Image (cartoon, rainbow, N blue to C red):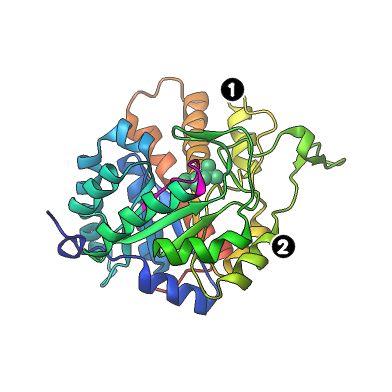
Amino acid sequence: MVSYKELGLVNTREMFAKAIKGGYAIPAFNFNNMEQLQAIIKASAETKSPVILQVSKGARNYANQTLLRYMAQGAVEYAKELGWEHPQIVLHLDHGDSFELCKSCVDFGFSSVMIDASHLPYEENIALTKKVVDYAHQYDVTVEAELGVLAGVEDEVSSAVSHYTKPEEVVDFATRTGCDSLAISIGTSHGAYKFTPEQCTRDPKTGKLVPPPLAFDVLDAIMEQLPGFPIVLHGSSSVPQEYVDMINQYGGKLPDAVGIPEEQLRKASKSAVCKINIDSDSRLAFTAAVRKVFAEKPGEFDPRKYCGPARDLMEELYKHKIINVLGSDGKA
Ligand code: 13P
């Protein structure tokens, strides 16, 4: 048993309380490799933003859970080296799908876990979530749960359709499970293709898809039921068109990729939404930068020469999200 506290990590409790009061949201960035982690930590240290490092099922399969945990431990030390005296870094399990997995993360130094039982019938979701909460809270590890279903595909979690969270269920769910935060479904979805062309309109000038707005009325109704309770938005990449264009310009093929407009995420950040999950945008930045190097310098074969620019572009993206979208800069 290793406590996250020994590793210099923090849980989400105080972070979320401050974010709700201050009208900003904490970035939850997924990481799978060293370059992504370096970019996240540099961006957070330079902007003095609290940050949540997320490990998904896909990341665990790709990079190994043990290695990722040690990387997060190293990230705390790296943050200090960068001059961030008291780093506010959470190591979070994204989309945990069983009690055993959540327990193994709690036992191994994660400071926060998500149990995603949203695909199960309501009572089963409550029972499994409560079991994880009861275990995790013994070690002061915070727990995120989910009600409602997001559409889209993300690292082995997928659904063809979304079901908005029912506001009439949230009080019962939060009270009976004791969860610390609640991921809700209000129209965001995982991946770089969040909406079909049929769900969007098209901007006549650019020909680009304009997505339908998020269901802020559902969010408002949830906040009315659970005043001041930490709300989480998954599937919140905005799919920046400059990266999509760069990828397409340098030989890629991402037609009609579309995400959540940043103004809507900015608006959500000012409410009880205190954690915003972003993964696809950094994949797009990485891919765009690598494709550019490959197209412009076909003789290049040193991975540092294309992973380096990818890391720089991801760092720029993370800083932009922190400062201009979530408003978490200067809060750690
Ligand atoms: P995106 O695919 O929109 O980046 O969402 C990531 C996410 O929600 C991880 O849980």
Residue 128 shows which numbered tag? none
Q: Would you say residue 313 is visible in this rendering?
A: no
Helix, strand or loop status at disc 2: helix
What secondary structure is marked by label 1?
loop
Q: Nearer the viewer, mark 1 or mark 2?
A: 2
- The x, y position of residue 4, in whole percent, is 20, 60
Task: State the image quarter where residue 224 is shown.
Answer: bottom right
Q: Residue furthest right?
A: 204
- State the residue in front, 115 or 212: 115
Q: Is mark 1 within 8 Å of ligand 1?
A: no
Q: Which residues are magenta?
A: 114-122
Above or below 274: residue 58: above
17 shown above or below 117: below
Instruction: Read off the residue under disc 1.
Output: 251
- Residue labelled with disc 2: 217
Q: Nearer the viewer, residue 146 or 201?
A: 146
Q: Is residue 267 left or right of residue 123?
A: right
Label 1: how many Cα within 10 Å (few below 14, some 14–19, many 20+): few
